[in-house]
């Protein structure tokens, strides 16, 4: 039997195990952190887009797919695209001031639950004796508004993840109030943006984004997008309660419209068409929304949320064409189904939509 010297005693097994575990944890943490100067890359944090389209609700755009865990409250902190932390700039609505130059607090916008009309369309159907007088015939614009074709950037099919947006080429990452900009929508359609500055040969281009605040823009890498030119444009007049589709200088279709009621007016903004959702069999929403739901790039200015989602404005059909000419919607523009069918078939994604008063 060999007796061990006290100077050569082994380390107790539990202590050795703890030391080994600590070394492994530190090694993994160092590998995960990487270099602070490493360029972030797209990461597929959402599952690849399926081929089918998820159910949707007009002016109610859920912030994320059901399979993705999102923060319970909105935040202005962007999710890093790599395992290194990026500094970010919060994109917010410009602050308003009073007569003395003092900054006014932002308005508190209401959260509106799903209206009963969605589950019971008869609520908005009036008996013949209660119908308002028919609106005067829609007068199409004598001439098309000044117009030049626009360039539309659509995320490529092989890009599935967060699209990083910066304040300048190689600048600081932008953080938007409702979270990151993804390469595809909640309904698994591709992200559509409008070119503001740059060319297809550039590494960086500036685009207008379909996110809040309305009119938000930023710089993105051109390689993540496919390019196209759109010559269609839509003019919506909330005073005349009319909608007109043009292709260049040629009028394609025009109609009267239902617009937002005084409590939830249709915003007078300029944006573009970002999604087309067929609804002939109510596969995407209630009969209230008609045969097509054409989602626009901007949001209600009177609501914080709608039916638990983002209050996106849409141009869509209606189950009550006899009430065209009234102001009774939650901000969306409702038109007869035969006209929304024409617009859905002829106006490509990226079509400019200009709402005037």
Image (cartoon, grey):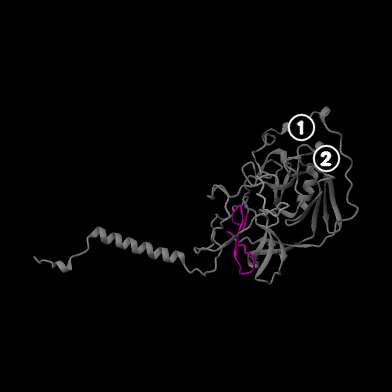
User: Residue 127 appears at what percent x and percent y?
Assistant: 80, 28
Q: Secondary structure at mark 2?
A: loop
Q: Nearer the viewer, mark 2 or mark 1?
A: 2
- Relative to 2, residue 74 above or below: above
Residue 104 in the figure: left or right of residue 236: left
For the magenta stretch, what is the residue range? 160-184
What crowding class fits label 2: few (fewer than 14 Cα within 10 Å), some (14-19), or many (20 or more)?
Answer: many
User: Residue 304 appears at what percent x and percent y?
Assistant: 65, 45
Considering the whole magenta stretch, tell me its main secondary structure: loop
User: Residue 261 appears at what percent x and percent y?
Assistant: 76, 40
Residue at the (70%, 64%) spot, across then down: 227
Residue at the bottom extreme of this rendering: 201
Residue 98 in the figure: left or right of residue 137: left
- Relative to 299, residue 155 above or below: below
User: Residue 221 appears at what percent x and percent y?
Assistant: 63, 67
Q: Secondary structure at mark 1?
A: loop
Give the residue pinned by disc 1.
125
Residue at the front extreme of this rendering: 100
Q: Earlier in the sequence, mark 2 or mark 1?
A: 1
The N terminus appears in which quarter of the rendering? bottom left
Residue 39 in the figure: left or right of residue 344: left
Residue at the right extreme of this rendering: 142
Report the disc number at residue 61: none
| Number of numbered discs | 2
Give the residue pinned by disc 2.
325
What crowding class fits label 1: few (fewer than 14 Cα within 10 Å), some (14-19), or many (20 or more)?
Answer: some
- Relative to 170, residue 47 above or below: above
Q: Quadrant of residue 60?
A: top right
Q: Is residue 136 magenta?
A: no
In-front residue for pair 290/354: 354
| Mark 2–mark 1 distance (CA, rounded to whole Å) | 15 Å
- Relative to 326, residue 7 above or below: below
């Amino acid at each position: 039997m060999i007796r061990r010297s006290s100077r050569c005693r082994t380390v107790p097994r539990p202590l050795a195990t703890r030391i080994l575990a600590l070394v492994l944890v530190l090694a993994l943490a160092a590998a995960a952190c990487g270099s602070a100067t490493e360029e972030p890359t797209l990461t597929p944090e959402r599952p690849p887009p399926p081929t089918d389209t998820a159910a949707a609700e007009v002016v109610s755009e859920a912030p994320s797919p059901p399979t993705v865990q999102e923060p319970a409250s909105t935040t202005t902190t962007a999710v890093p695209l790599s395992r290194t932390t990026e500094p970010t700039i919060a994109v917010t609505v410009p602050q308003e001031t009073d007569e003395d130059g003092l900054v006014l607090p932002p308005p508190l916008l209401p959260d509106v639950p799903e209206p009963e009309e969605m589950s019971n369309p008869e609520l908005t159907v009036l008996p013949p004796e209660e119908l308002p007088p028919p609106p005067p015939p829609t007068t199409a614009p004598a001439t098309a508004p000044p117009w030049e074709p626009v360039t539309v950037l659509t995320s490529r099919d092989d890009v599935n993840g967060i699209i990083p947006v910066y304040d300048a080429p190689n600048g600081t990452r932008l953080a938007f109030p409702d979270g990151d900009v993804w390469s595809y929508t909640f309904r698994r359609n591709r992200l559509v943006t409008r070119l503001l500055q740059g060319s297809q040969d550039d590494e960086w281009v500036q685009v207008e984004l379909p996110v809040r605040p309305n009119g938000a823009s930023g710089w993105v890498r051109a390689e993540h997008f496919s390019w196209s030119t759109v010559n269609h444009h839509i003019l919506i007049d909330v005073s005349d309660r009319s909608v007109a589709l043009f292709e260049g200088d040629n009028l394609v279709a025009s109609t009267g419209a239902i617009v937002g009621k005084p409590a939830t007016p249709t915003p007078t903004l300029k944006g573009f068409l970002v999604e087309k959702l067929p609804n002939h069999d109510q596969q995407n929403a209630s009969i209230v929304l008609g045969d097509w739901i054409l989602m626009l790039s901007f949001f209600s200015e009177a609501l914080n949320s709608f039916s638990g989602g983002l209050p996106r404005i849409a141009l869509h059909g209606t189950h009550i064409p006899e009430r065209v000419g009234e102001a009774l919607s939650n901000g969306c523009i409702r038109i007869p189904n035969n006209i929304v069918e024409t617009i859905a078939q002829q106006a490509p994604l990226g079509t400019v939509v200009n709402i005037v008063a």
